Image (tube, helix red, strand yellow):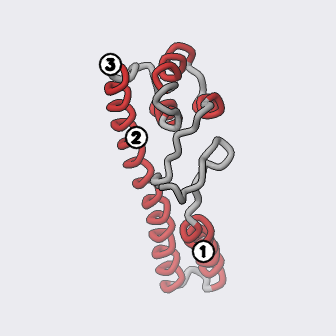
Amino acid sequence: MSNLKLQSYDNHKKFVPLYHFVLAPISLIVFIASIVHIFIEQFSFSSLLIFGVTVCMVILVVLVRQFATQLQDRSIFNEENFRHVHLTGKPLDPRLSLQQIISLRFAEDESFPQLCKKAAETGIEPKMIKKSITHWRADHYRV
């Protein structure tokens, strides 16, 4: 992992070029073109069929991303709960939201329990949790 670059609040977001810059835009373009095609062909069977297939494609593109991130969020919750138990002997505070826990995963072990307590007591927003982390724990394996 030494060849992976250090993460911080400024560079922690991940983009998958084939998904974000190729598949998603192309599916949107094809969807719009299929709508135009419906009107040009005056609602012909083939134009409606193309539109239906395109709608399925767009739904699939959205669901693929949604399913992956939901599974990742579930894993992060379990990993961070285990980490908290390992460090403190207690599970995470139930007042913490999933988004807060996801943000807390970037905190190193030394500051993690204190940040968890602060987030639970104050209800600090996930974005502010990330900004308050002084020693960043990189996550290069997220979706």
- The picture places residue 135, in percent across and down from the top left corner, at 59, 34
What amino acid is at disc 2? Ile
Q: Residues within 10 Å of mark 3 (few under 14, many from 20)?
A: few
Residue 76's mark?
A: 2
- The picture places residue 100, in percent across and down from the top left corner, at 51, 30
Disc number lying in front (1 or 3)? 3
Disc number lying in front (2 or 3)? 3
- Quote the CA–CA distance across marks 2 and 1: 31 Å
- Dot 2: element: helix
Q: Residues within 10 Å of mark 2 (few under 14, many from 20)?
A: some
Residue at left offset 54%, top offset 57%: 4
Residue at left offset 58%, top offset 32%: 126
Residue nearest the observer in this picture, 64 or 58: 64
Q: Which of the two labelled residues, at mark 2 and mark 1, occupies the earlier sequence position? A: 1
What amino acid is at disc 1? Ile
- Quote the CA–CA distance across marks 1 and 3: 47 Å
Residue 26's mark?
A: 1
- Dot 1: element: helix
Residue at left offset 59%, top offset 22%: 124
* Outermost residue toward the top in this view: 121
Query: Mark 3 highlights which residue?
Result: 90
Residue nearest the observer in this picture, 92 or 26: 92
Q: Which of the two labelled residues, at mark 2 and mark 3, occupies the earlier sequence position? A: 2
Q: Residue 20 appears in which quarter of the rendering?
A: bottom right
Residue 92's mark?
A: none
The answer to the question of whether label 1 and label 3 lie on touching residues, with beta carbons closer than 8 A, is no
Q: Is 60 drawn above or below residue 96 in the view shown? A: below
- The picture places residue 76, in percent across and down from the top left corner, at 40, 40
- Dot 3: element: loop
* Outermost residue toward the front in this view: 2
Task: Tell whether 122 sits left or right of 74.
Answer: right
